[in-house]
Image (cartoon, helix red, strand yellow):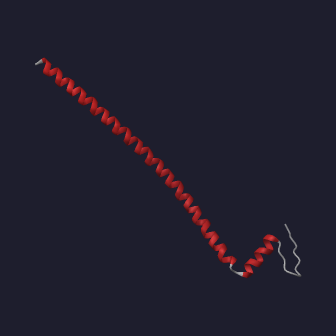
Amino acid sequence: MARRVRKEKRRLFIISIITLLLLASFASSLYKNFIQILNNRKETAKLETEYEKLLDEQKALTSEVTKMQDPDYVARYAKEKYLYSQEGEIIIKID
């Protein structure tokens, strides 16, 4: 009878150790996944902010392209930005 009790105690001890190891492994995996989710959320927020900035830049550039299709705007832009002048014009730059 004593041998049976010892065998059952030993069996319960081994099963308990295996169960604890499995639980520890599960908890470790759960923690790693939780940390990865938090990092992914931070990265998503950062990328969404960058995306919004790029959309704003795209709108500005699209507007600039539309303006550059107007010959009067291009002429005025060249005069202001690059001090371009047509024949007979004199450019006076005032700071």
Q: Position of residue 34 (x, y in %)?
A: 41, 45
Residue 59: x percent and y percent? 60, 70
The picture quadrant where one finds residue 56 is bottom right
Q: Residue furthest left?
A: 1
Task: Name the quadrant of the N terminus.
Answer: top left
Instruction: Left or right? Give the position of 47 relative to 74.
Output: left
Residue drawn 78% across the image and 74% down it: 78
Name the quadrant of the C terminus.
bottom right
Count of numbered marks: 0
Compared across the picture, whether 2 is left or right of 17 comes to left
Name which quarter of the figure residue 57 lies in.
bottom right
Q: Residue at x 41, y 42 (%)?
A: 32
Residue 15 x %, y %: 23, 30
Q: Quadrant of residue 82?
A: bottom right
Q: Residue at x 40, y 41 (%)?
A: 31
Residue 73 vertical position relative to residue 33 in the rendered view, above or below: below
* Residue at 40% in and 45% down: 33
Residue 94 point in image, percent of width and height: 86, 69
